[in-house]
Image: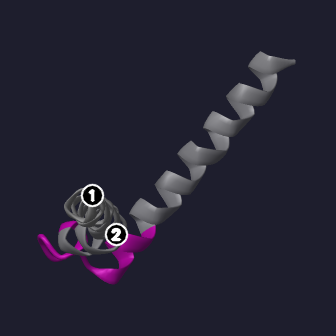
Amino acid sequence: MAEFETRDSFEKKIRKLRKDFQKNVQPVLRRHNYYLSKGERRRIKRKKAIKRIQRRMRRLVGAA
């Protein structure tokens, strides 16, 4: 019985570690994959924000 519980907790810890990696480490690795100037990062961020707002507006209009 104890072996089953330790295996179960081990599985939970692995899942938690994997989720943490996906949330915290992968974006950093992706961001440092190649160099982007400050201005380029700003332009990309602005474009993403505009797309996000447009998508929200489409959802609101489509739902109404």
Q: Is residue 51 left or right of residue 21?
A: right
Q: Along the polypeptide, which appears first: circle 2 or circle 1?
A: 1
Q: Secondary structure at mark 2?
A: helix
Q: Which residues are magenta?
A: 30-42
Report helix, strand or loop for mark 1: loop
Return the residue nearer the eye: 41 or 23.
23
Please tell me whether residue 40 belongs to the stretch shown in magenta.
yes
Which is more toward the observer, 4 or 56?
Answer: 4
* Residue at (20% x, 66% y) in the render: 30
In this view, the residue farthest toward the left is: 34
Residue under circle 2?
A: 20
- Whether residue 21 sits left or right of residue 47 in the image: it is left
Q: CA distance from mark 2 to mark 1?
A: 29 Å
Q: Quadrant of the N terminus?
A: bottom left
Name, please, the residue furthest toward the right.
64
Establish if 27 lies above or below 56: below
Amino acid type, residue under disc 1 in the picture: Met
User: Is residue 11 toward the left or the right of residue 39 in the image?
Assistant: left
CB contact under 8 Å: marks 2 and 1: no
Q: Residues within 10 Å of mark 1 (few under 14, many from 20)?
A: few
The kind of residue on which mark 2 rests is Asp
- From the top left corner, tell me how far across and down residue 62 is, in percent: 75, 17
Residue highlighted by disc 1: 1
31 sits to left or right of 57: left
51 w.r.t. 26: above or below: above
- Measured as percent of width and height from the top left, residue 39 is found at 37, 77
